[in-house]
Amino acid sequence: MDLTEYRKDLIFRYHRIAGKRHSDKEKERFIRSLLIDLGKNNNEVHVIETKNQNSKNVISRNIYVGDVKKADQIFATYYDTPTAHLGPYYIFNKELQEKNSLYFNLFVGLFIIGVGLLFTILYTVPQLSSNLMTMFEIILLVVFYFIFFIFLRKFAMGWPIKSNLIRNTSSIIWMLEKISENKDKTIAFAFLDNGTTNEHGLASLLKSVKANSKIFYFDSIGAEKNLYVNKNNQVESFTSQKFDDYGLYKIAPGIISNHELILMKSDLKENQLSENNFKQISDFFK
């Protein structure tokens, strides 16, 4: 299978079939599919499960290809998908991004509660007081409140976004393409959990690598915007970066607005991958 057909196959499976990776069940389905793909080339694969020290309920399942403890270079990305949020995506500002997600959940949650209260005041209370409700009307009322509380619970936990080709399936696809052609044993790969929330999966990886290694962490690289690199909170153009020092390099496309690298919602909803960014990254890391 040539690269074009391989990429189409990956897009179909990881965008169309396993494109939403928010709940534990959705993540497990993705991991099963990923392990099948990685097993085809006799890769050394490890699934590492860790608990967040600050919250024992948060579990990260990282998938490592190769030996991350000995590797000189580690290519990494996150595989979980984001929830709805207000405004653009602030790529390197997790605190601001989390606030925008919370504000979205708050506003929509308040709207749903308002609808429920109005329905209760204007319909439920008068109907129950009249004692004239039929069995069919009672069943409809129960169904309404059942759906109401499901939606309320969904938004309290965050509403998963369905259009995830750019963020962050695109980075997963590039990684799988790189793995399929890699023969260098000094390179390892990491598919990380909880990248859209607290980056616990990334923190777990950083504890495992050796001090003199380089970690290249990709985010939304399929967006049709110029690539940037964040090293120690210093953001520079990808083309100007030398990658001489050891440590973590976060690589993502976007535009600079008010000293923040962002992607607009229209960028995140694109259904085409940036061939230019894929080629630029692949050529650099040959």
Image (cartoon, helix red, strand yellow):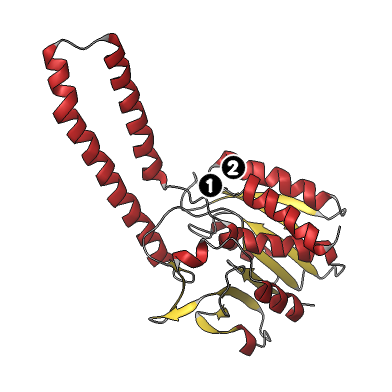
Give the percent coordinates (x, y) of residue 92: 48, 72
How many numbered marks, from 0 up?
2
Q: Residues within 10 Å of mark 1 (few under 14, many from 20)?
A: many
Query: Is 13 left, or right, of 23 in this rendering?
Result: right
Query: Is 165 left, or right, of 87 in this rendering?
Result: right
Indicate which disc residue 261 carries: none
Indicate which disc residue 22 carries: 1
Give the percent coordinates (x, y) of residue 57: 49, 44
Residue visible at 84% across and 66% down?
A: 181
Query: Is 270 left, or right, of 178 in this rendering?
Result: left
- Disc 2 marks a residue whose amino acid type is Glu
Q: In 3D space, how far apart are the residues under numbered discs 2 and 1 (Cα atoms)?
A: 6 Å
Residue visible at 82% across and 71% down?
A: 186
Looking at this view, is 215 or 238 the one in front? 238
Q: For the N terminus, which image quadrant?
A: bottom right
Q: Is residue 212 visible?
A: no
- Disc 1 marks a residue whose amino acid type is His
Question: Residue 179, located in which quarter of the rendered image?
Answer: bottom right
